[in-house]
Amino acid sequence: MSEHGTNETAKLYHDYKREGYDFFVGVPCSYLKPFLIELERDAGTTFIPATREDVALSIAVGAHMAGRKPVVYLQCSGLGHLVNPITSLLKPYGASIHLLISLRRQPFEHFEMYRITRDLMRLMEYDNYRIVEEAEPI
């Protein structure tokens, strides 16, 4: 797990490529827009936008089983959709899919998931993730 305090999400894409990640699927997030722009520019990389986080994770598991190295990107507000797939699919079968989680305080409906995201990941004992956190509003 690692965290970024500033919006360096465009750089993250290139970091992931250097680390061998070759399959990206997730639910678009405005905070990850620079990351997604870099992803879209790379015609040689598989990029699948999904409508829900659990769907994205399921697609990523299939890619993993086919020999790919996937990243699932999501907002913290969608993390609740991944509790069952992480605990009932990834953990029992020993699969580890990397999650890129944008931690957002705003708008207000994101705040509770912002508040509990780290604790929820610890509770699930899942450590293959990276958090990018938006700067605190001034």
Image (tube, rainbow, N blue to C red):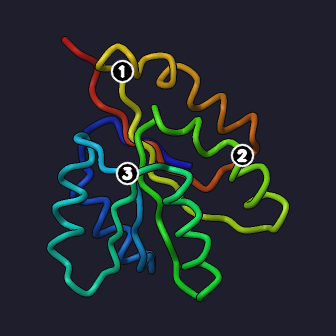
Q: Is residue 101 above or below residue 63?
A: above
Real-space Cα distance between discs 3 and 1? 18 Å
- What is the crowding at mark 3: few (fewer than 14 residues within 10 Å), some, or many (at least 20)? some
Residue 59 in the image, given as x and y percentages of width and height: 53, 69
Q: Say whether marks 3 and 1 touch (CB < 8 Å).
A: no
Real-space Cα distance between discs 2 and 3? 17 Å
Identify the residue at image location x=45%, y=52%.
100
Which residue type does callout 2 highlight?
Asn
In the displayed structure image, the side of residue 91 where residue 50 appears, left or right: left
Mark 2 vs mark 3: which is more N-terminal? 3
Residue 50 in the image, given as x and y percentages of width and height: 39, 58
- What is the crowding at mark 1: few (fewer than 14 residues within 10 Å), some, or many (at least 20)? many
Q: Say whether marks 2 and 1 touch (CB < 8 Å).
A: no
Mark 2 vs mark 1: which is more N-terminal? 2
Identify the residue at image location x=58%, y=41%.
81
* Secondary element at tag 1: loop
Mark 3 vs mark 1: which is more N-terminal? 3
Residue that mark 3 sits on: 27
Residue that mark 1 sits on: 105
Residue 80 in the image, given as x and y percentages of width and height: 59, 35
Nearest to viewer (mark 2 / mark 1): 2
Q: Residue 38 lies in what quarter of the image? A: bottom left
* Secondary element at tag 2: helix
- What is the crowding at mark 2: few (fewer than 14 residues within 10 Å), some, or many (at least 20)? few
Residue that mark 2 sits on: 84
Q: Is residue 37 above or below residue 115?
A: below
In the rendered view of the protein, which quadrant contains the C terminus? top left
